[in-house]
Image (tube, rainbow, N blue to C red):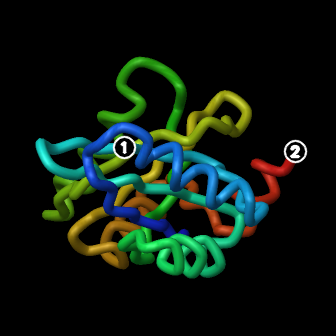
Amino acid sequence: MKLKQLSVFLENKPGRLREACDILGANHINLLTLSLADTEQFGILRLIVNDSETAKAVLEEAGFVAKITEVIAVEVKDEPGGLSNVLKIEEDAGISVEYMYAFTIKSGENAVLLFRFDNMDKAIDALRTAGFNVLEANEIHQRAAR
């Protein structure tokens, strides 16, 4: 139920993001979704890819700093207040969002959002108890392949 996310630390200079994308593309790594957070000196590129272990290895071989962390994917009603409903469940359970971003795939009338919480297992339990669908990694990869 947790997805492997690849985080890549990029120097904040022209061409560095393209270079990372070129390496992944040359190694047949498909980007399912991504987020890029920027600071003054570096950025953090967060990716969900079809093969995170290979992606990490090829990026590190090319001199990038990369690590794998876990996130969860939650189906959220694609309507006003949909995200707020998820956040309320986690707030009531005493869980904080570390970061989040959206998937490019949809699930029927629902959007799929990725979350990193400070307590991932407790967050999953709270969401499932409240009736939210926390997607399995294989579901995400199958939907993205369509």
Residue 107's place in the image compared with 80, above or below, is below
Left or right, 41 with reference to 14: left
Taking depth in this image into account, of 65 and 2 the one nearest to the observer is 65
- Residue at figure coordinates x 74%, y 66% from the top left: 27
Say whether marks 2 and 1 touch (CB < 8 Å). Answer: no
Residue labelled with disc 1: 36
Residue 129 visible in the snapshot: yes
Q: In the image, which is nearer the foreground, mark 2 or mark 1? A: 1
- For residue 146, the mark is 2
Mark 1 falls on what kind of element? strand
Residue at disc 2, secondary structure? loop
**Residue kind at label 2, given as amino acid type:** Arg
Number of marks in the image? 2
Residue at 33%, 67% (x, y): give it.
123
Label annotation for residue 115: none
Quadrant (top left/top right/bottom left/bottom right) for the N terminus = bottom right
Q: Quadrant of residue 92?
A: bottom left
Quadrant of res 70: bottom left
Does 72 appear above or below 61?
Answer: above
Residue 139 shows up from this direction = no
Quadrant in which the C terminus is drawn: top right
Tag 1: amino acid: Leu
Q: Residue at x 26, y 45 (%)?
A: 12
Q: Position of residue 104 (x, y in %)?
A: 61, 36
Rendered location of residue 81, percent (x, y): 36, 25
Residue 53: quarter of image:
bottom right
Mark 1 closeness class: few <14, some 14–19, many ≥20 residues within 10 Å: some
Measured in 3D between alpha carbons, the distance from the residue under mark 2 to the one under mark 1, in whole angstroms, is 25 Å
